Structures are given as structure tokens and as C-alpha cells.
Image (cartoon, rainbow, N blue to C red):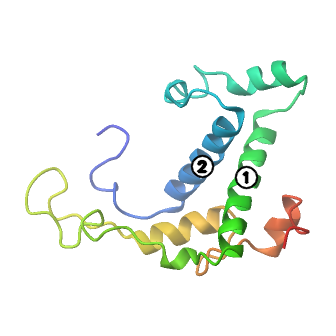
């Protein structure tokens, strides 16, 4: 309840999109490094994965550099799916998960998830087209992926 105020839990806004994008980037680093996902739940301050990666690799990258690597991984995943014919617009959650119809009892009574707006905000926060989910040419260039397509 402290993380998500009931009045705003299901309402889209760019802060949520930015937080979701940051989580995606961080989890890509965790997965790529083969680190324990359980430890990641403690948070970056308690689980200094970037420092450990620097020690293990001999690199001297800042947290921002690692987050950009995570963004590059997320964008590569999206590019792979697009190349394989997966249209991100057609990826759907079940109606029940979205509150269609809204639940009649419980903590989520009467709530509906505005998934289309949430998804568009998430895509936009990653520099992808908010309508199609395709990474923009500027994003690809910034991430050094402009030769991939």
C-alpha cells in the first residue's frame, strides 16, 4: 500500500513509465550478469551489483552506463521480436487481469487497468514509437544499434 497509493495505482503517468523502464533495464543487467534475482529485491543500495560487475570485469562503469546497457538489451529484445514478426501491439493481457469486468469485491473492487496508455507511456519512455512499439531511429543511433536493422 505504501508503494502504490490506491487513488493512483491504476492511473497512467510518465513517472510510472519511467520507473517501469528503469526496472526493465536493471533486470536486463541482472539477467545478463547471471546474478540472483532474489537479491535484487533488496534494491541497488543494498545489492551493489554495479560495483561487483566492475570488480569482476575490470571495468569502471557508472550506474548510468549499466542502465544504458540494460536499455540496449531491452531494445535488442524488441528488435528481435519485431524481426520475427511479433507485433507488440497485439500482445495482450487477459481481460480478468485488466479488470474487465471490474471485480465486485476485494482490494481491487471497481478498478480497471488502462493498459493501452500504460503501454504507450512505457514505450515512449524507452524512446520507442508509442503507437507501434518500434524503437525510433534516434534511439537506435543513441544506443549504437542503428546498424542492427
Q: Residue at x 72, y 71 (%)?
A: 135
Q: Residue at x 54, y 72 (%)?
A: 120
82 to 111, vertically: above or below: below
Where residue 97 sits: x, y (%)?
29, 62
How packed mark 2 is, by other alpha carbons closer than 10 Å (few <14, some 14-19, many 20 or more), is some
Which image quarter holds the C terminus?
bottom right
- Element type where label 1 sits in the image: helix
The residue pinned by badge 1 equals: 73
Which image quarter holds the N terminus?
top left
Of marks 1 and 2, which one's residue comes earlier in the chain?
A: 2
**Residue nearer the viewer, 11 or 147:** 147
Q: Residue at x 33, y 37 (%)?
A: 2
Q: How many marks?
A: 2
CA gap, disc 1 and disc 2: 9 Å
The residue pinned by badge 2 equals: 24
Tell me the quarter of the picture where residue 92 sits.
bottom left
Task: Tell which residue pokes out farthest to the front in this image.
Answer: 84
Amino acid at each position: 500500500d505504501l508503494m502504490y497509493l490506491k487513488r493512483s495505482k491504476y492511473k497512467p503517468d510518465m513517472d510510472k513509465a519511467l520507473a517501469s523502464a528503469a526496472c526493465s533495464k536493471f533486470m536486463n543487467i541482472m539477467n545478463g550478469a547471471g546474478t540472483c534475482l532474489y537479491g535484487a529485491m533488496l534494491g541497488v543500495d543494498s545489492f551493489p551489483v554495479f560495483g561487483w560487475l566492475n570488480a569482476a570485469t575490470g571495468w569502471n562503469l557508472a550506474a548510468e552506463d549499466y542502465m544504458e546497457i540494460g536499455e540496449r538489451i531491452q531494445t535488442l529484445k524488441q528488435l528481435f521480436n519485431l524481426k520475427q514478426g511479433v507485433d507488440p501491439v497485439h500482445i495482450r493481457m487477459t481481460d480478468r487481469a485488466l479488470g474487465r469486468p471490474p471485480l465486485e469485491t476485494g482490494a481491487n473492487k471497481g478498478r480497471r487497468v488502462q493498459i493501452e496508455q500504460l503501454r504507450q507511456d512505457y514505450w515512449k519512455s524507452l524512446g520507442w514509437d508509442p503507437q507501434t512499439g518500434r524503437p525510433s531511429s534516434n534511439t537506435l543511433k543513441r544506443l549504437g544499434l542503428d546498424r542492427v536493422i
